[in-house]
Image (cartoon, grey):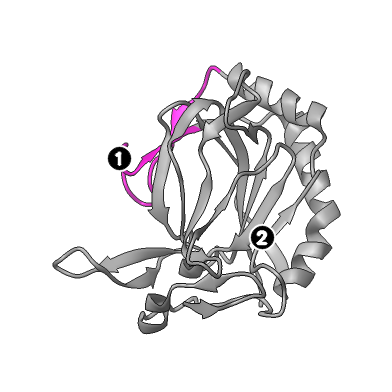
């Protein structure tokens, strides 16, 4: 393991791989990612969640540049109303400067917001947001190829909360956000269990490859966006 922030380490195999988009935040910060709490209020989260659950035009998310494959990803895409999109934009602008300072980036254009719903049994296996894995004949990862270099930063705003024993559709169990190559000083992989209203922000490159663990109960909803910018 090699240390990349005060409390987070990265797997050593990353050092031997060709990663064209490799970049890390200031190593003197406590964590190499951000968790911004309270971006949305509880009532705003509930309104967005219930609107998504009432959506009749749900589609299953496909893989980037590929057809639907539910062995890799089982996720629904919901519709975000104009009212809730305006709210999202307003709240993002309120934290933009904080994000830009943390990652030393000047954000420019961004993708549209994806409203991603995970019900019981839904998941997304390990992936990098800006690159595809390169594997050898044995199936081992040997590097990464950049396929979406315009994705420099990923933001994930949650409207439902993790809890071990959910009792309503505003909570879920399972569904943790796991960073596959990042760990603590004891070698435990970094696993986030966010609260509704939290925004998780991380660089989109392979150092931050991640997965969504299978949902056990409840409903996980997040507003996801990928951002370009000047580094």
Q: Is the residue marked by circle 1 packed among few (<14), some (14-19), or many (20+) residues within 10 Å?
A: few
Q: CA distance from mark 2 to mark 1?
A: 29 Å
- Can residue 105 be seen in this snapshot? no
- Where is residue 104? Give x, y as percent: 72, 75
Q: Which residues are magenta?
A: 56-76
Q: Which residue is mark 1?
A: 69
Q: Is residue 6 magenta?
A: no
Dot 2 falls on a residue whose secondary structure is: strand
- Please determine whether, in this image, residue 95 is positioned above or below residue 20: above
Image quadrant in which you'd find residue 51: top right
- Where is residue 83? Give x, y as percent: 77, 30
- Where is residue 144? Give x, y as percent: 36, 71
Q: Which residue is mark 2?
A: 109
Instruction: Please state if 200 lies on the left or on the right of 47 as rendered.
Output: left
Which residue is painted at 54% across and 17% down in the image?
56
The circle drawn on residue 14 is none
Report how many numbered discs are placed on residues in the image.
Answer: 2
Could you tell which of marks 2 and 1 lies nearer the N-terminus? Answer: 1
Q: Label the magenta part by its dominant secondary structure.
A: loop
- Please determine whether, in this image, residue 8 is positioned above or below residue 200: below
Image quadrant in which you'd find residue 194: top right
Marks 2 & 1, CB-CB < 8 Å contact: no
Which residue is painted at 32% across and 48% down in the image?
66
Instruction: Please state if 124 lies on the left or on the right of 223 as rendered.
Output: left
Task: State the residue lying farthest toward the bottom.
Answer: 16
């Amino acid at each position: 393991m090699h240390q990349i922030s005060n409390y987070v380490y990265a797997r050593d195999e990353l050092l031997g791989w060709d990663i064209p988009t490799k970049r890390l935040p200031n190593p003197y910060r406590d964590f190499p990612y951000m968790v911004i709490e309270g971006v949305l209020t509880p009532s705003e989260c509930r309104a967005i969640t219930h609107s998504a659950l009432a959506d009749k035009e749900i589609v299953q998310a496909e893989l980037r540049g590929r057809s639907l494959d539910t062995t890799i990803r089982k996720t629904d895409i919901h519709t975000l109303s104009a009212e809730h999109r305006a709210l999202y934009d307003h709240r993002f602008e309120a934290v933009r400067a904080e994000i830009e300072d943390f990652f030393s980036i000047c954000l420019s254009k961004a993708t549209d917001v994806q409203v991603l719903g995970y019900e019981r049994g839904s998941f997304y296996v390990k992936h990098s947001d800006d690159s595809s894995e390169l594997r050898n004949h044995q199936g081992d990862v040997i590097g990464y190829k950049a396929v979406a270099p315009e994705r420099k930063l990923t933001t994930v705003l949650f409207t439902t909360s993790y809890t071990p024993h959910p009792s309503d559709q505003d909570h879920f169990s399972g569904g943790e956000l796991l960073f596959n190559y990042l760990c603590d000083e004891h070698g435990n992989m970094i696993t986030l269990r966010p609260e509704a209203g939290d925004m998780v922000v991380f660089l989109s490159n392979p150092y931050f490859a991640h997965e969504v663990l299978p949902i056990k109960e409840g409903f996980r909803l997040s507003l996801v966006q990928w951002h370009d910018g000047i580094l």
